[in-house]
Amino acid sequence: MAPTFSEGGKLGFLHSTFDAFETFAFVPNTTTKKGSHVRDCNDIKRVMIMVVLALVPAMLFGMYNVGLQHSAAFGLDWGFGQMFWYGLLKVAPLFIVSYLVGLAIEFTGAQLRGHELTEGYLVTGFLIPLIVPVDVPLWMLAIAVAFAVIFGKEVFGGTGMNIWNPALLTRAFLFFSYPSKMSGDTVWTGGLSKFLAKGHCFQGSDSLVDGFSGATPLANLGTATPDCGWFTDMFVGTIPGAVGETSVIAILLGAAILIWTGVASWKIMVSSIAGGLLIGYLGYWGGATELPGYYQLVMGGFMFGTVFMATDPVTSAQTECGKWIYGFLIGALAVVVRLWNPGYPEGMMLAILLLNTFAPLIDHCVITRSIAKKAKKAKVNA
């Protein structure tokens, strides 16, 4: 088929599209012609697919949890299979819309410019359904995806050139354009009736339960108390929240895959956790919250953002020292927003996007300091 889609062939104008499918199915046989290079069968597609595989545990648990929350809200006596099937039917349309809209724009852009199709959207399209509420209207999601791909990625030149994480831009677009669907007490389909029945972990929180939907635990951070096995529920993930963000166990499985394969930086993950713990405990000791600092790690999208968003190799810091600084500031800023900004209970999205902006500056400062330090050392030695 290749000659037909090559230059001069009948369908040569579709070369970009054909190349995208060919390199997805087969390892490219392109080799370097000159210079010293490391030969490796892995290309960008293989790296991106590894990230997708790392996201699978969070996705599968998220599907089960959607059914669990629905079953709890309506008092249904569902088994595991019924819960998972319900969640699958609810989550699948999010993936379909995410990939159809995003890939359509990417294929169109590649065809119009005559460029090879980039592989970055393999991960972005998988991430987006995991960081939004399962009940977000599909037309809203489609608009947000289109905005993120066009203005957050394509205008900068495509994969590897974008300043901000496209998946987070999708969530930010939804949050600022349709806040009623991304925050407040009337989102996150499922309900808290069963969750709260375990012992009323939130003071005065019964008013949130309406039988159909309810606020996430993070929305009640100021009145939450550390009892009732609440930490265990959040660690396992059996709480309301975005599809892929609730289960810390599933996220840690993904983190292990990314670290083992060398795809993501463990330095960013560790430093982000350190920053979150530091500010979390400062807030706890200062009376901003009754929850010890380690609770911040299992609430909201902190761990998901730390493992899958902050470590994005395109938008994160590139220098080794810069990774420590970058990750620490993300974790610290996320908890600062949570504890001292009454209008927005979750700060991970804003923290990552802000540090995406300053990542080049962090690298610049690290490199400049390193050069100055070496110059000074050379002068002393001379």
Image (cartoon, rainbow, N blue to C red):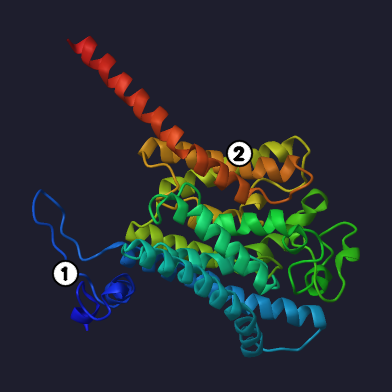
Q: Is residue 362 above or below residue 82?
A: above
Q: Which amino acid does label 1 sit on?
A: Asn
Instruction: Choose top left, top right, bottom left or bottom right for residue 66.
Output: bottom right
The disc, 2 or 1, on the residue closer to the chain's N-terminal end is 1
Q: Name the residue under label 2.
A: 278
Residue at x 42% of width, y 45% of height: 267
Where does the image place residue 367, in percent across and percent down from the top left?
Answer: 35, 29
Marks 2 and 1, how far apart in space? 49 Å
Instruction: Choose top left, top right, bottom left or bottom right for residue 5.
Output: bottom left
Badge 1 marks a residue whose secondary structure is loop
- Compared across the picture, whether 380 is left or right of 84 comes to left
Q: Name the residue under label 1.
A: 29
Q: In this view, does 98 lie above or below 269?
A: below
Q: Which residue lies furthest to the left in this view?
A: 34
Residue at x 48% of width, y 49% of height: 269
Q: What residue type is labelled 2?
A: Leu
Residue at x 60% of width, y 53% of height: 302
As rendered, which of 72 and 341 lies closer to the eye? 341
Where does the image place residue 137, in percent across and percent down from the top left?
Answer: 70, 72
Q: Is residue 111 above or below residue 346?
A: below
Is residue 382 visible to us here?
A: yes
